[in-house]
Image: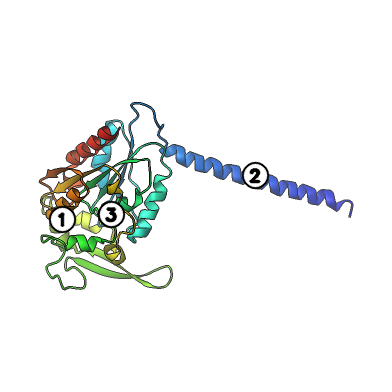
Amino acid sequence: MSHRRPVRRARLAAVSAAGLALAAGLATTASATQDHHAKPAGRPGVKPTVVLVHGAWADSAGWTGVAKRLQADGYTVAAPANPLRGLRSDAAYLADYLKTINGPVILVGHSYGGAVITNAATGNPHVKALVYVAAFAPDKGESIADLVGKFPGSHLSDDPNAPVPTALNAVPFTQADGGTGVDLYIKPDKFRDVFMSNRVSKSKAAALAATQRPLTAQAVGEPSATTPAWKTIPSWYLVARDDRAIPAAAERFMAARAHARTVEADAPHAVHLTDPKAVTRLIEKAATTTR
């Protein structure tokens, strides 16, 4: 027995050392993750980080034209993937992502991404401005379905009584808990009209339709659950006059309600793809005004 105790003590010491090394490694990894997004806070002349949040039927790559211009002008840019699973969970995901960024943030949302930033930014003192790009800016208790149906003009459906908008395909899928969810895709033959207002070639529209990311039906109908961030954070809004997904009248209504500084562009719903210069100008205006 006298020989085993030192052995046991040695083993316990080795385990403890390994645990400390693992903890140190995790701490270093977490620190490195934060440093990757780090921005010195409170220093004069330091530009904010711009976070670009995509909406439905798109992905982060859709921000490429905007991101390149912002980076050329000296901004740090992040375009995290929006899960598109449900408004509450998507907003929680983005809120957690924003916690990894030090310093001021300009938060930009396109389409459904606007509803996500409206919820995710609430209570975050680092978010200095919200920029809505042909986007939803719901009030508490509103869903994006409510806002689309508030004004005529959307090409998502030509039958208001249809259970699924006629421009969309509903694709059931099995959820992690064994239940059934429904993903919504724009039909390939409708994509060019609804998303691009026929302003790009058929081949480009076909490629975008093939690579679109779906939005769940749950996300469409889920009401906004928090006090909207636009009630306390300065907001900017770009209205796309030829938007065939969200009626331009709905965009003007949301912009006015949020007291957003508003510009208009003769552009389709995917204005960040067709006119990235106009989108970049508005983001930079928000960034310089709030510094």
Q: Amino acid at mark 3?
A: Ala
Q: Dividing the image into 4 quarters, which one contains the C terminus?
A: top left
Residue, far top: 44
| Secondary element type, mark 2 | helix
Residue sticking out furthest to the right: 2
Residue at x 31%, y 66% (from the top left corner): 218
Mark toward the start of the polypeptide (3 vs 1): 3
Looking at numbered disc 1 in the image, what kind of residue is underneath it?
Ala
Point out the frontmost of discs 2 and 3: 3
The picture quadrant where one finds residue 185 is bottom left
Asked if the residue under mark 1 is in contact with the one under mark 3, i.e. CB atoms within 8 Å, the reply is no
Q: Which residue is mark 2?
A: 20
Mark 1 burial class by Cα count in 10 Å: few <14, some 14-19, many 20+: many
Q: CA distance from mark 1 to mark 2?
A: 56 Å
According to the picture, the residue beneath numbered tag 3 turns out to be: 115
Q: Residues within 10 Å of mark 2 (few under 14, many from 20)?
A: few
Is residue 184 shown left or right of residue 91? left
The amino acid at mark 2 is Leu
| N-terminal label among 1 and 2 | 2
1 horizontally vs 34: left or right: right
- The residue under the point 24% across, 40% down is 66
Q: Which residue is located at x 54 percent, y 40 percent? A: 28
Q: Which residue is mark 1?
A: 250
The percent position of residue 181, horizontal first and vertical second, equals 34, 69
221 lies left or right of 264 = right
Closer to the eye: label 1 or 2 = 1
Where is residue 12 drawn, in percent x and y? 74, 50
